[in-house]
Amino acid sequence: MMEIIVIGTGNLGFHLCKAIENQKVVKNSAFAKAKNNNVKNSLKLVGYYNNSARVMTDLKAPLLDSIHNLPQADLVIIATPDDDIAQVSAALKTRAIVAHTSGSVSIEAVAHHKNHGVFYIPQSFSKTREMDFSTLPICLEFNNVTAQKVLEDLGNTLSRKLTHLNSEQRGRLHIAAVYMNNFVNHCYTKADQILNDAQVDASLLYPLMNETLAKAQDLSPLQAQTGPARRNDEQTIARHLKSLKSNDRAMYEAITQSIKNTYGN
């Protein structure tokens, strides 16, 4: 049985703890095929730690009181904010494999541990939404075969989608994820504000939201692009800019110009 400690119980750390405690082997996962048996309970969450000393009532494992004196484990996963990873890693006194979960931080942040790696999941997590780990891609990096085996066993136990990326590749994936998730969601927020100000029901755009995603996946985002910037409709763009609040115009202009540049307008 693999014994695991998770440092950090934010959105990702909390869901990772739950997934470890409630593991379900996917029938067609690489791990299930390799073992050819039911490996439920092959993972054990030894404990978790957070700076606020907050007990997570959804978890059976105990809250640990310090990262300086961790119990024995096979793997310690650092699921803290990116800027804290190197400091937390340096404070750990453990013989376990140490891995962080960041998309943008190099594997070097945990490199002073003999066996180390990265366990990155390109997904947006929220505590109030359940997540099916079996559908999530998991991106691994490791410094040796010892770390590789443990991280692959964990990844293949939780998911059917496992891949290996180096730090540079993972960093580019994270940038793309920021565009696809964070920036797009902010555009949804701005759209909501515009509609709320006009007392228009935001759900009128839900079919458009769904179709935009479907077309991007079916055709490719480049081919799916439409709108006034794509058509170079200058009069429409001017009307939009005039209608927008002054502090929202720069964002509209920047995205519009980026679209024009992409299509040579």
Image (tube, helix red, strand yellow):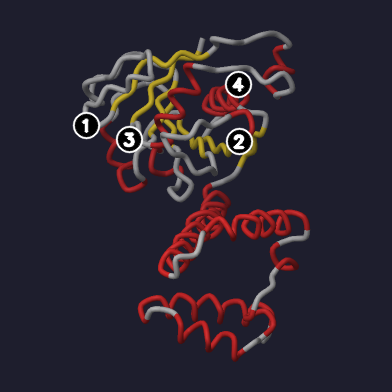
The image shows residue 141, relative to residue 236, as above or below, that is above
* Residue found at the very far right of the displayed protein: 219
Q: What residue type is labelled 1?
A: Ser
Pick the front one: 150 or 49? 49
Disc 4 crowd, CA 10 A, few/some/many (<14, 14-19, 20+): many
Amino acid type of the residue that numbered disc 4 sits on in the rendered structure: Thr
Label 4 and label 1: CA atoms lie apart by 30 Å
Of tags 1 and 3, the one toward the viewer is 1
Q: Answer yes or no: do the residues labelled 3 and 4 have beta carbons within 8 Å? A: no
Residue extending furthest toward the front: 199
Task: Name the N-terminal-most of marks 4 and 1.
Answer: 1
Q: How many neighbours does mark 1 have within 10 angstroms: few (below 14), some (14-19), or many (20 or more)?
A: few
Instruction: Look at mark 2 in the image and give the residue it sits on.
Output: 136
Q: 35 or 132: nearer the eye?
A: 132
Q: Mark 4 points at which residue?
A: 157
Mark 1 or mark 2, which has the lower sequence index?
1
User: Which numbered disc flags the more N-terminal residue, 1 or 3?
Assistant: 1
Q: What element carries label 4?
A: helix
Q: Name the residue: 56% across, 79% down.
A: 256
For marks 2 and 4 on the same chain, the one whose residue lies earlier in the sequence: 2
Q: Which mark is residue 89?
A: 3
Q: How far apart are marks 1 and 2 (CA)?
A: 29 Å
Q: Percent position (x, y) of residue 145?
A: 57, 27
The reply to whether the C-beta atoms of the residues labelled 3 and 2 are less than 8 Å apart is no
How far across and down, in percent of the image, does residue 218 sit? 77, 55
Which mark identifies residue 52?
A: 1
